[in-house]
Image (tube, helix red, strand yellow):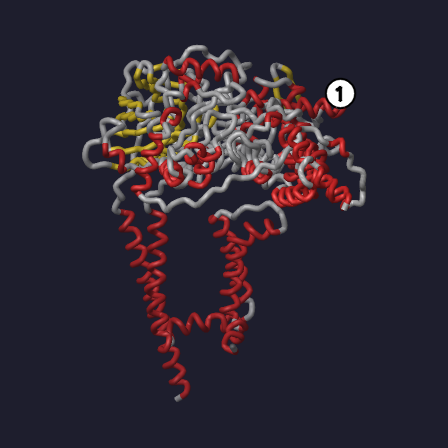
Amino acid sequence: MSRVRQALRHPFWQAFILLLVAYLFFKFGIAYLPALLGMHSAPVPSSVIMQYMFIALVGVLIHVSSDEARWRQFKEPVQATLVDRDKKWLRLSLLVLVPLLVGFATYQRTRPRVDAPIELRSIHPAPPGQITFRGKTIPLTGLENPLRKRGSMPEHLRTGQRVYYQNCVACHGDRLDGQGHFANGLSPAPASFADAGTIAQLTESFVFWRIAKGGPGLPREGTPWNSAMPVWEDFLTEDEIWAVIIYLYEQSGWQPRRWEAHGAAEEGKAP
Amino acid sequence: MRKGLRIADCGNGRRIADGIWQIAKGVSGLREADFSNRLERRFATLHPCARIVLCALSLLLIRSPQSAILEAQAAPRGKAVYDKWCAGCHGDDGAGVGSAATYMLPQPRDFTKGVYQIRTTASGELPTDADLRRILDFGMPGTAMPGWESKLTENERTDVIAYIKSFSKFFAGKAPTAIAIGKAPSSSSEGLAAGRAAYQKLECFKCHGDAGRGDGKSAPTLTDDWDHPIRAANLAASWRFNGGSTVEDIYARLRTGLDGTPMPSFSDAVESKVVSDEDLWRVAQYVRSLSPEETPAVREVIRAGRVEGALPSSPADSLWAQAERYFVPLTAQIIVKPRWFAPTVDGVWVQGLHDGKRLALRLTWPDPSRSPDPAWDEWLGRVKQSVFEADGAVPVTQAGDRLVLQFPQRIDEEADRPYFLGGNTRRPVYTWRWTSNPDQATEATGTGLGKYVAAAASAVTHSARFNAGEWQLQLTRSLASADTTKSPIFREGQAIPVAFYAADGSNAEDDTRGSVSAWYAIYLDVPTPPRVYIAPIVTMLLTAGLGTMVVMQAQRREREHGRSNLEEYR
C-alpha cells in the first residue's frame, strides 16, 4: 500500500496517470459524459485525439521540467530502466514489445484498406443571401415567416400537417426523427427534427431555403450529389412551405432561431 | 343483499363492472329496464343463486371494473395524442383516410371496422389491449407504422389505445381473450422437411410461392377488406414481417390469421386434424428458415474478390456461392417527378468477382412477377386505383422489369461525384441498364433519372434468369474502358462509386417510378503488395536498433559516471 502511495507522489507516475486520464477523457468522456446530462455529443475523431494528446504531453513535460529537483526525480525511473541490473528483464521486454507495437502500427497503415472514400460534409452550410423561388427573388437575410402575421394559425397548422404527411413523412417520419418508412438506405440519413441540432438551431428562413432548394441546392461543402432531399419548389407553393415550417416547430416543440433586431446577417448561419 | 341481487341481474360483464363500481362508490339506483336482449332475459330467469355464481365466475374472467371506468376516462385524453400523432395517416375519424393514406401501400388501418391483422385472439375476434399495445409500441415492420414506445409516454400510449378502441362499437362488448399458444418443438433438419411438406399440404405456395417469395399464382389477385391490393408476404425477408420475425410470431400468425387480409387462420385445420399442431410449428420454423438469421446489415463497400481461373458465365454458376453477398437497401423514388410511393423492390443483393481483366457482378432481388405478365394486369389496375397519381398518370400497361447500375464517368476521389439520382447534364453518369423486355443490357450515359443515351456499342454483357420470384442477373465488363471520356476504367484496389435503381413493370414501374439506392462503392481486391509485409519489418528493426543504442549509450555513460565517481572517491 505504501508503495502505491509512494508511486502516486512520484512525478513520473503522476505524469503517466495524468496522460492516461486525459486519454480516457478525450476518447470516452467527451463522447458519453454530456449524454448523461441529456446534452448532445459525439466521439472525437482519432486524429483530433492525437492532437489533444500531444498538447497534453507537452503540458506535462513543461510542468515536470519546470523544477530542477522534480525533473531529476522524473528521469529516475527512466534511467533506472535503462541501466539498472535488477531491471534487466523489464529492459529486454520493452526492447521487444515496443518494436512489435511499432511494426503492428505500420502494418495497420500500409495494409490495403477497403474503406469508402471519406466525404466531409457540412451539415448546416451558410445560406445564400437570397434565392429565386419559381422566378421570384426572395431575400433570405432577416426574412421572417410571413404566415405568422397573416391568416389563422389553426388553418396554417392544418395545411402544414397535410403537406407534411403527404410529402415529408415517408423519410422524416411521423415521430419527426428522420426514420420514416423510406428512410432506410438513404445516405446521408434524413434529418431528425426531434434532434436539438437541426431546426432548433435554425431560423425559419434557413429552413425555407433548405426545403425550397433541397439537396441539389446545397453549396459544394454540403455534398449536394448525395442528398435525397427533393427540390420542393417543384412540388409546393411558397405558402405551403411556410405552413409546413410552422407545423414542424409546433409538432417538435422547438422555437425557431430569431434574427437579431439590428439585421445581423450572420444569424442565418447556424453552427 | 338486495343490491347484490341487482348486480346479478346485469347482463354482461361491462354492466356488472359498472354496477359494482357504483355500489363501491355508494351510488344506488340501477334500473331493471336494462334488459335489452334475449340472452340477458334468459339469464334473468335463472335462480338468483345461479346468477350470483355465474356473475362471480364471469367477474374472474373479465377485466376489473376500475379498468373499464378508467378507460372511459382515458379516451378523451387519448384524443389529444391521437390528433397530434396519428390523425395524419389514420384520419381524424379513425377511418384510415388521413392526408398520407394514398401516399403509402399498405394503407393506414381503418379503426372503425375493428378488424386487426396482428392479434393473439382467434380469427374474427377483436385484438386484446396487449395486442394493440404491442403494435403501438413496436410498429408494423414492412409498413409505414413506426413504434411509439420511444416517443409517447406510458400514459399517453394507454390513453390513445382507449381512444382508438372508441372508434369501433365492437370494443364495447366482452373483452377478447388470447388463444393458448404452446411451445415450439426443437428445430431439426427433419423438422424443416416436415415443415416444407406441411407448407405444400396447406397450399401456402398458392399465394406465397414455391420458394416463399410472394410469387404464388394467386398473388396478383389478392386484396384486403378495403379492396386495396395486398402483397403475399415475401417469406425470405423476415425483417418485413408485420407481426414480428420469430418462430413464435409466425406460428401465432398461422393460428390467428391476418384478419382483413386473405391470410387465413389454420386453427380449424389443427382442430379438425388436417394438420397436427406440431406440423404447424414446423411450418413456422420452415418459414423462418427461408430468411437470413439476422436482418442484413448495410455495408458501404462491396468487395469483389479476385479469382484465378475463369469468371462465372451466368448467375447460376456455382462460383457465385462462394462470393460474399452484400445487401443494398433500395427506397422509393419520391424525389423527382413522377414520384412513386409503392415500389416493389426494397433491396438488391450484390456480389462481385474479378480476374484482373474483367469485373462480374451478380445482382439478385425478389420480384414476384416476370414483367410483363398478363396475370398481373389485375394487380396493376388496383395499384393504380390506390396510389397517389397527381405527379402524372400511372401507366396502364406493364413495362418490363429493369435494373440500372450507375458509376461516375471518371473515378477520381478528389472530384465531386455526380448526383446520386441518375446524374445530371452538368455531371452525367455512366450506366449499365438492363431490361427484361426485351432482355438486354446496354451501356448508356445518364443525364438525370430515366434520361439515357445508349452507347454505340455496348461493352457490358449480361445473363439474366428469373427463378421463383427472384431475378438473378450477371453483368460483366472489362476493367479497361472503351471510351474513357464516357466510361470509367475500373482499377484494382480502388473504391468505385456505384448506385442502383430497380423497377417492377407489373407494379406500374418504369424508368422513374421505382426504387433507388444511395452511392455505394465496389472495391476490387488486389493481391497484397510486398511492401505491406516489408514496411513493418523495417520499422521494427529500426526501432529495436534505436532502442538498443539508447540503452547501450545510457549504460556506458553510467559506467563512466561510476568510474569518475570512484576516482573522485579515491
Quadrant housing residue B163: top right
Q: Residue B83: horizontal and vertical position, in percent? A: 67, 30
Q: Is residue B270 left or right of residue B82?
A: left
Classed neighbour count for the residue bearing mark 1: other residues with Cα under 10 Å, few (<14), some (14–19), many (≥20): few
Quadrant housing residue B468: top left
Q: Is residue B103 left or right of residue B56?
A: left
- Vertically, is B377 above or below B19? above
Viewer-proximal residue, B193 or B157? Answer: B193
Q: Is residue B444 left or right of residue B46?
A: left
Residue lying furthest bottom: B570
- Vertically, is A233 above or below B298? above
Q: Identify the amino acid type marked 1.
A: Gly
Q: Is residue A84 left or right of residue A175?
A: left
Q: Residue at x 33, y 51 (%)?
A: A107
Q: Residue A38: horizontal and vertical position, in percent? A: 62, 48
- Vertically, is B106 above or below A32? above
Quadrant housing residue A245: top right
Mark 1 belongs to which subunit?
Answer: A
Quick check: can you spot residue A177? yes
Q: Residue at x 25, y 29 (%)?
A: B316
Viewer-proximal residue, B381 or B103? Answer: B381
Looking at the figure, which quarter contains the C terminus of chain B?
bottom left
Quick check: can you spot residue B448? no
Q: Residue at x 62, y 21 (%)?
A: A131
- In this figure, which residue is indicated by the disc labeled 1? A151
- Vertically, is A11 above or below A35? below
Kind of element beneath mark 1: loop
Q: Residue A148: horizontal and vertical position, in percent? A: 74, 25
Viewer-proximal residue, B72 or B163? Answer: B72
Q: Residue B216: horizontal and vertical position, in percent? A: 37, 23
